[in-house]
Amino acid sequence: MQVSLVVAAGEDNAIGADNRLLWKLPNDMKFFKNLTWGMVVIMGRKTFASLGYKPLPGRMNIVITRDGSLFTPTPTLKIAGSLESALAVASEADCNEVFVIGGGEIYAMSIPHANTIYLTRVHSVFPQADTFFEFPESDFFRKQHNFFAADDKHAVDYTFEVWERVNTEV
Ligand SMILES: NC(=O)c1ccc[n+]([C@@H]2O[C@H](COP(=O)([O-])OP(=O)(O)OC[C@H]3O[C@@H](n4cnc5c(N)ncnc54)[C@H](OP(=O)(O)O)[C@@H]3O)[C@@H](O)[C@H]2O)c1
């Protein structure tokens, strides 16, 4: 099973503050929806909280938490006590690719498992950020990058990047 990370980060690697995103980029939301629709997504409990504790529609959601009693599982909401257990649940769902969608803690533990990183680089810095995403760029190569300039709906420039692991034996 392919493990992919989907993340948007500032030039300073900022990804969030006060359990919220730092920008409004409708094109990035569209990209995220298209990429993950019909797929299995894995997220940390705090990111799930930032979604109002509502599973993303059209996807199987797996939430990682140390407190398994917090939620009642449903066909589209699964609870896992660790990343490894979340990956096992995804694997049982028979999917070819699973998407890790944040936040900071869960990305950090997922990087050793990641084959692909879909990174939206937001070309600004965010001094108010309290959560960050960093990955070892030398272990990956940037296979694609598409730049978009700011416009009336997007306050900042951004680039959609796809990074693939150089050594695929993960
Ligand atoms: N820019 C982006 O692309 C992006 C995407 C997603 C999220 N974000 C942002 O990221 C921030 C949230 O990230 P975060 O790092 O604070 O939280 P997080 O990674 O979403 O979730 C952290 C939670 O995961 C659970 N967890 C962590 N390690 C665990 C382990 N070893 N075993 C079991 N459970 C474990 C714990 O849940 P319990 O406390 O329930 O035990 C922990 O509180 C927000 O600001 C959000 O907006 C940004």
Image: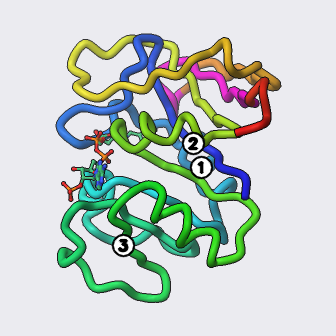
Q: Of callouts 2 and 1, which one flags the residue occurring earlier in the amino acid sequence? A: 2
The residue identified by callout 1 is 32
Q: Rounded to the nearest whole Å, what is the CA distance between mark 1 and mark 3?
A: 22 Å
For the point 66% across and 71% down, the residue is: 38
Q: Is residue 153 magenta?
A: yes
> Residue 55 location, x and y as percent?
40, 71
Local crowd size for mark 1, using a 10 Å CA cut-off: few (<14), some (14–19), many (≥20): some
The answer to whether 31 appears left or right of 144 in the picture is: left
> Residue 39 location, x and y as percent?
65, 67
Above or below, comparing residue 64 to residue 156 in the picture: below
Above or below, comparing residue 122 to residue 113 in the picture: above
Above or below, comparing residue 144 to residue 63 in the picture: above
Looking at mark 2, is its residue's CB closer than 8 Å to ligand 1? yes
For the point 28% across and 85% down, the residue is: 72
Identify the disc placed on residue 79: 3
Q: How many marks?
A: 3
Q: Which amino acid type is shown beneath numbered disc 2? A: Val
The residue identified by callout 2 is 6
> Dot 3 lies on which element?
strand
Local crowd size for mark 2, using a 10 Å CA cut-off: few (<14), some (14–19), many (≥20): many
Q: Which amino acid type is shown beneath numbered disc 1? A: Phe
Q: Nearer the viewer, mark 2 or mark 1?
A: 2
Span highlighted in magenta in the image: 152-164
Q: Nearer the viewer, mark 2 or mark 3?
A: 3
Q: Of callouts 1 and 3, which one flags the residue occurring earlier in the amino acid sequence? A: 1
Q: Of callouts 2 and 3, which one flags the residue occurring earlier in the amino acid sequence? A: 2
Q: Rounded to the nearest whole Å, what is the CA distance between mark 2 and mark 1?
A: 8 Å
